[in-house]
């Protein structure tokens, strides 16, 4: 029986072929520690109550000793304790209330603590579970590589065709040393071509040709137009906000200007009237 348990525990390593399944297995493995703590606390509580019940002067055979009392309390936790046994406990009120306290502590308190532990542990592992799954896959690959023969490895490498260049699109040949995978066109839509293509030799000693379309491309024109529109909208919003403040402060400014109106008129009489007209014109332009 133990051999079969160990055999299937080793088979779980096959989950690394699927990254999502491997991440799920790793999360479950991290949760086993929390479940083990819950079971340990439950066993301690069961032994404690069974030891206490065995010290009482009572007639219930199920609690005459620690082993039998522990078995009875464990069955209560698993809802395997029959109703007839609970009816018999009415003859021993102390044992009955002790069983009620045990059930409240075990099924209410400990189970809620287990749920909180699992939730916190899952939140801590969830963000990195995909990374952990990839690390485990790499570890298994590294451990399995020494067991692969040289001829078998050479056949595998030749079958992968790493020296063949990858084709991005039909007729668009890219770099080598990779594996091409296909995806739907709607998965990652792109409206701007990020690959710049130049004609001529690809020798590192030859300088790359200058992009003659700089500043004349339609996309750059649209981008510039979009920037100008954004700036104009920002100015309009700022001016509208300042206009409200100016209207609020205009009444106070007008009240203060009435007191100095006589001095201003005397100055205007002594000078030419063109300055006042120019000031008025500037105010209208503002």
Image: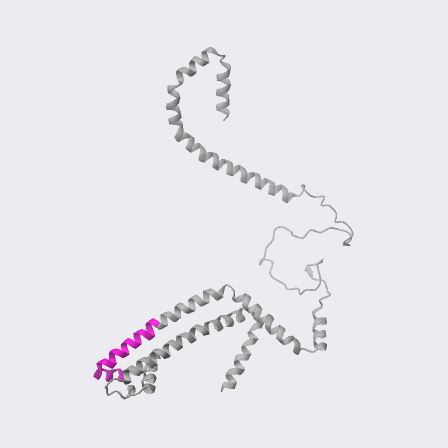
204 shown above or below 10: above
| In this picture, residue 244 sits left or right of residue 217 | left
Indicate whether 196 appears above or below 99.
Answer: above
Quarter-of-image position of residue 139: bottom right
Nearer to me, 216 or 158: 158
74 and 23: which is toward the camera? 74
- Which stretch appears magenta? 84-109
Q: Residue furthest top?
A: 270
Can you give x and y, in whole percent of width and height, for residue 209 in the image? 75, 47
Task: Please indicate whether residue 115 sits to the left or right of residue 150 in the image.
Answer: left
Which residue, as the protein is rendered here, is positioned at the far front? Answer: 55
> Would you say residue 68 is visible in this rendering?
yes
Name the one closer to the observer, 45 or 204. 45
Of residues 110 and 196, the one drawn nearer to the viewer in this rendering? 110
Question: How far across and how far down the image is residue 15, in percent?
Answer: 55, 74
Q: Residue at x 42, y 69 (%)?
A: 118
Residue 142 at x, y percent in the picture = 63, 73
Q: Quadrant location of residue 204?
A: bottom right
Q: Where is 157 relative to 239, above or below?
A: below
Q: Is residue 168 above or below residue 155?
A: above
Residue 277, x across and y down, in percent? 49, 17
Q: Magenta-highlighted stretch: main secondary structure? A: helix
Residue 81 appears in the rendering: no
**Is residue 100 highlighted in magenta?**
yes
Magenta run includes residue 192: no
Q: Residue at x 37, y 70 (%)?
A: 113
- Residue occupying the point 63% across, 41% down: 221
């Amino acid at each position: 029986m133990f051999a079969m348990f160990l055999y299937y525990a080793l088979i779980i390593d096959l989950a690394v072929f699927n990254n999502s399944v491997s991440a799920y297995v790793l999360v479950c493995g991290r949760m086993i520690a929390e479940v083990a703590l819950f079971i340990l606390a439950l066993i301690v509580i069961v032994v404690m109550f069974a030891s206490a019940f065995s010290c009482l002067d009572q007639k219930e055979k199920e609690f005459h000793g620690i082993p039998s009392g522990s078995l009875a309390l464990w069955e209560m936790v698993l809802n395997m304790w029959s109703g007839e046994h609970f009816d018999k406990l009415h003859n021993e009120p102390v044992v009955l209330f002790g069983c009620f306290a045990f059930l409240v502590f075990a099924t209410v308190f400990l189970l809620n603590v287990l749920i909180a532990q699992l939730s916190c542990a899952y939140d801590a592992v969830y963000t990195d579970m995909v990374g952990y799954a990839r690390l485990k896959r790499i570890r298994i690959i590294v451990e399995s590589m020494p067991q692969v023969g040289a001829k078998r490895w050479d056949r595998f490498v030749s079958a992968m065709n790493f020296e063949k260049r990858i084709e991005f699109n039909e007729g668009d040949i890219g770099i080598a040393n990779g594996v091409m995978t296909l995806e739907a066109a709607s998965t990652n839509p792109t409206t701007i071509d990020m690959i710049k293509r130049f004609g001529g030799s690809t020798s590192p000693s030859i300088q790359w040709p200058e992009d003659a379309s700089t500043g004349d491309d339609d996309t750059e024109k649209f981008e510039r137009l979009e920037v100008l529109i954004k700036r104009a909208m920002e100015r309009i919003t700022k001016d509208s906000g300042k206009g409200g403040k100016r209207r609020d402060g205009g009444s106070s400014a007008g009240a203060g200007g009435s007191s100095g109106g006589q001095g201003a008129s005397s100055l205007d009489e002594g000078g030419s009237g063109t300055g006042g007209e120019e000031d008025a014109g500037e105010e209208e332009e503002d």
